[in-house]
Image: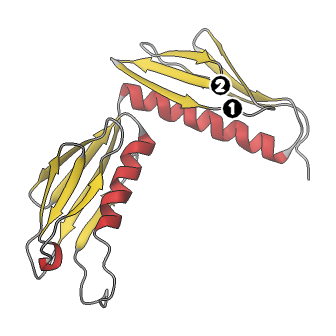
Amino acid sequence: MPVTGLKEEIVEIPAGVEIGLVGDEVVVAGKGVTLRRKLSHPRVRIAVEGKQATVRSEFPRRRDAALVGTFAAHLRNLIVGVTQGFTYEMKIVYSHFPVKAGVKGSEFVIENFLGEKFPRKTRILGDTKVEVKGDQVLLTGPDLEAVGQTAANIEHATRIRGFDPRVFQDGIYITKKAGET
């Protein structure tokens, strides 16, 4: 069933935040942080006028109307990223062997996981900062996708194969995502 007429969403731009369009790329800058995101679709347009960004589609198709909402959500996430940033919390869980975790350069290193001899490593994406305090891991950064994907990479690096998960519950798990209270 087609959506009738024009689909439009308006995103308010707060003070101290600048949004620019460079071709297909949206550039959001504020508080010394600049984020870039490619948002392009032939039937969806983004326009910046004053302190408002307008995302619009003039074609009565359900998919185009959905993309308008998606692009508007991406713009809101970029604005929150440059003003406040995003934070994920993770917890290190172990019962048999004490796990040692830390940051070495642009890698997150997990040592002595299940008594393994060699460390497990995963990449830290973008401008994400990773901090380990005891059994808590705190990930912060301006880009929601980079912070979320880094957390997923860490969780995936400690996935256990070949053991009963009811007995071996060791790992590093996400306990709080960005935006949750």
x and y, in percent, of residue 162 in the image = 32, 88
Residue that numbered label 1 is attached to: 40
Q: Nearer the viewer, residue 109 or 94?
A: 109
Q: How far apart in space, not on screen, are marks 1 and 2 (Cα)?
A: 5 Å
Q: The residue tagged with tag 1: helix, strand or loop?
A: loop
Q: Nearer the viewer, residue 148 or 180?
A: 148
The reply to whether residue 181 is visible in this rendering is: no
Q: Earlier in the sequence, mark 1 or mark 2?
A: 2
75 with respect to 106 (left or right): right
- Mark 1 in CB contact with mark 2 (< 8 angstroms): yes
Q: Residue 8, relative to residue 152: is it above or below? A: above
Residue that numbered label 2 is attached to: 24
Instruction: Identify the residue at image location x=16%, y=49%.
Output: 103
- Residue 30 falls in which quadrant of the image? top left
- Residue 115 falls in which quadrant of the image? bottom left
CA neighbours of label 1 inside 10 A, class few (<14), some (14 to 19), many (20+): some
- Residue 95 falls in which quadrant of the image? bottom left
Instruction: Identify the residue at image location x=9%, y=78%.
Output: 97
